[in-house]
Amino acid sequence: MRASNSTTLPVVEIKLDAFGNRKFAGHVDSFSPASGAQFSLLPPDNATGNFTKVVQRIPVKVVFEPESIKGYESRIAPGMSATVDVELK
């Protein structure tokens, strides 16, 4: 998936806990080329000989579609709990 080279960006459905069942629309703007562990100052070293599965999270930037947040602009703030569904083709 390459959001920057795609002519149609992946469609995103955003649900914010503060607004109940209200769904907002958006699109993927960008995503990090690696997980946070790759860019950390002291990356984890799992060279103990035992395999440990570590979940890696990739940061993704999602942008709201302006028409979907009309009337909610002043109430949406950074740090709100969100559930985001991305439709991949």
Image (spheres, rainbow, N blue to C red):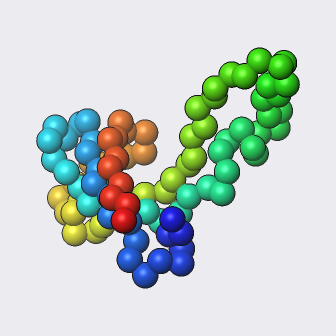
Image coords of residue 5 (percent x, y)? 53, 78
Is residue 23 left or right of 8 when viewed as pictured?
Answer: left
Q: Is residue 7 above or below residue 55?
A: below
| In front of the other: 54 or 13 | 54
Residue 17, picture quadrant: top left
Task: Identify the residue at image location x=32%, y=64%.
Answer: 11
Task: Identify the residue at image location x=51%, y=65%.
Answer: 1
Spot the residue most to the bottom: 7
Q: Is residue 6 above or below residue 28?
A: below
| In front of the other: 80 or 51 | 51
Spot the residue most to the left: 21
Question: The C terminus appears in which quarter of the rendering?
Answer: bottom left
| In front of the other: 28 or 16 | 28
Decide if residue 63 is in sight here. no
- The mark tally for this picture is 0
Is residue 45 left or right of 61 when viewed as pictured?
Answer: right
Task: Identify the residue at image location x=51%, y=53%.
Answer: 60
Image coords of residue 67 (percent x, y)? 22, 69
Decide if residue 82 is in sight here. yes
Image coords of residue 65 (percent x, y)? 30, 67
Residue 24, picture quadrant: bottom left
Q: Is residue 56 above or below residue 65?
A: above
Image coords of residue 6 (percent x, y)? 47, 77
